[in-house]
């Protein structure tokens, strides 16, 4: 069994509803959710004129491969109306795999740990809330250490 850390984000429609629906699908289609962070409201990253996001990190424990988790996550995004039209574009739901245990994967469409997580306050705030001591397998630092070195100054507020 492997602990998988996922970042959920939504900035279109009923953002709370999309986060809740995503958790329901993840719970049913992948594995029981073990931990859920608070919800954080965040300025849009990468495309600053977009609506603010709600973000949340969850942890689940599964026997599925990282590739299978990705397939199921992409399917859930589609069910919840995700459309991939532009990079960093607004979305009903976005589900990123942050960590798959301590594994390091570098494939064209699957990079774990998530290659940008250490640069993003909207990821590190909820991650630090539920797993501050988790050690990043590439950086060899725990989440609190990474967060303390963060340069990202976007406003991220816990709701």
Image (tube, rainbow, N blue to C red):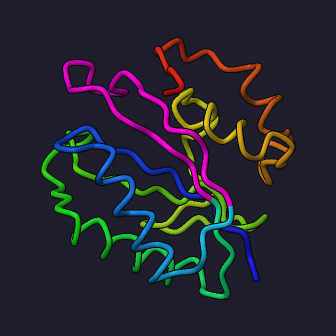
Could you tell me which residue is drawn at 22 percent across and 50 percent down?
Answer: 92
Residue 157 locus on image (x, y percent): 50, 20
* Left or right of 74 in this view: 157: right
Q: Quadrant of residue 149?
A: top right
Could you tell me which residue is drawn at 61 percent across and 53 percent down?
Answer: 36
The relative height of residue 39 versus residue 51 in the rendered view (above or below) is below
Q: Quadrant of residue 14?
A: top left
Q: Nearer the viewer, residue 108 or 85?
A: 85
* Left or right of 106 in this view: 61: right
Could you tell me which residue is drawn at 71 percent across and 37 percent down?
Answer: 129
* Left or right of 85 in this view: 135: right
Residue 19 locus on image (x, y percent): 38, 52
| Residue 54 part of the magenta segment | yes
Count of numbered marks = 0
Q: Which residues are magenta?
A: 35-58
The relative height of residue 66 versus residue 158 in the rendered view (above or below) is below
Residue 63 locus on image (x, y percent): 67, 87
Q: Nearer the viewer, residue 4 or 159?
A: 159
Task: Tell me the quadrant of the picture where the N terminus can be found.
Answer: bottom right
The relative height of residue 84 versus residue 49 in the rendered view (above or below) is below
């Amino acid at each position: 069994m492997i602990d998988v850390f996922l970042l959920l984000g939504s900035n279109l429609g009923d953002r709370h509803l999309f986060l809740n629906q995503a958790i329901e699908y993840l719970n049913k289609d992948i594995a029981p959710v073990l931990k859920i962070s608070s919800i954080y409201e965040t300025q849009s990253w990468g495309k600053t004129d977009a609506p603010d996001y709600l973000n949340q990190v969850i942890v689940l424990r599964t026997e599925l491969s990282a590739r299978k988790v990705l397939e199921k996550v992409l399917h859930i995004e589609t069910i919840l109306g995700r459309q991939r039209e532009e990079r960093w574009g607004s979305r009903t739901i976005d589900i990123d795999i942050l960590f798959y245990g301590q594994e390091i994967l570098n494939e064209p469409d699957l990079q774990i740990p998530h290659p940008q997580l250490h640069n993003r306050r909207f990821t590190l705030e909820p991650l630090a809330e539920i797993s501050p001591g988790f050690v990043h397998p590439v950086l060899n630092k725990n989440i609190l250490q990474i967060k303390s070195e963060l340069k990202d100054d976007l406003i991220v507020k816990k709701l």
